[in-house]
Image (cartoon, helix red, strand yellow):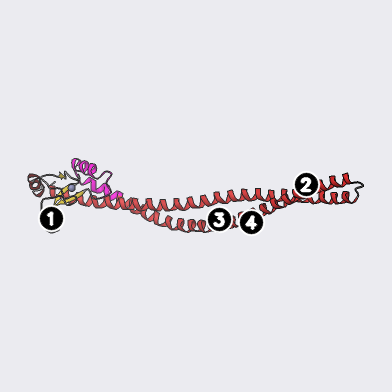
Amino acid sequence: MEASDTVGELIVLQEIDLEILRIKGELGELAAEVSGLNETVEALRARRTELTGKLTEADERVRRFQRAVEAGRTTLKRLETRSAAVSNMQQHFAVRSETDTARRNLMSAEEDQLAAMQEVETLREQLTGVEVELGAAEDALETRSAEVDVSRSGLESELESRTSKKKTQEGRLDTKTLRLYQSVSGGRKDSALACLTADGVCGRCYTAVPKQRQADIRAGRGLAICEGCGVILYPETSDA
Ligand SMILES: [Zn+2]
């Protein structure tokens, strides 16, 4: 095979490879997008579970302080009854001291209950907010997943056809050229080929190519690698 033919076949192979890279890149972006939406939904569900747990605990506290408030009121009533029945100063002072303590306890229980009720209210608001956000995130995930499925199956069939084209095209190259191309293009996300410019530099990185090698490339005497960036150099065609 003439070197110029080889270059032509390599350019075709590279076009297919760049298409394959593009398709794989798009598939990767779609997968990342859906996984991002999934993570958002999972995070919001976890937050909802956490808030629901906290709300249950806060509700229990409200009920506990409610019982403490009721018990405190009962105690005060009992002390009032006793206070009406005291028969001497000693009993009077004893009841008054107990009443002061019971009042303080009741006030403190009422404050605790109020604080717990406010906490419940705050948690309910937060939970409502999270539920709204979660609903929107679940909708976004569902809608986008359906769209992504369609795009993905299109891209996958494109990929399949490009892969079979690639095999055919590889079959048109000799093993040595193919190996060279594969070693240059492997891991690259851009062009594995660049033209040798009329000024005698690599068309990609502008490294100067030695005169003798320039002559070999232009005469089609085998393939040459750029010393600067490692791409395969091909001669600039006059009709290009
Ligand atoms: Zn170069």
Q: Does residue 99 appear left or right of residue 51 in this picture?
A: right
- Residue to which mark 1 is pinned: 237
Task: Check whether the beta carbons of the residues at disc 2 and disc 1 lie within 8 A of each other.
Answer: no
Task: Check whether the beta carbons of the residues at disc 3 and disc 2 lie within 8 A of each other.
Answer: no
- Residue to which mark 2 is pinned: 101
Asked where in the image residue 151 lies, by quadrant, the reply is: bottom left
- Range shown magenta: 163-190
**Kind of residue at badge 3:** Val
Q: What residue is rendered at 42% in x and 57% in y? A: 150
Lower sequence index among marks 1 and 3:
3
Q: In the rendering, which numbered label is found on residue 60?
A: none
Q: Does residue 65 appear left or right of residue 54 in this picture?
A: right
- Mark 4 lies on a secondary structure that is helix
Quarter holding the C terminus is bottom left
- Residue to which mark 3 is pinned: 130
Where is residue 153? Give x, y as percent.
39, 54
**Kind of residue at badge 2:** Thr
Q: What residue is rendered at 12% in x and 44% in y? A: 222
- Mark 1 lies on a secondary structure that is loop
What type of secondary structure mainly makes up the magenta span? helix
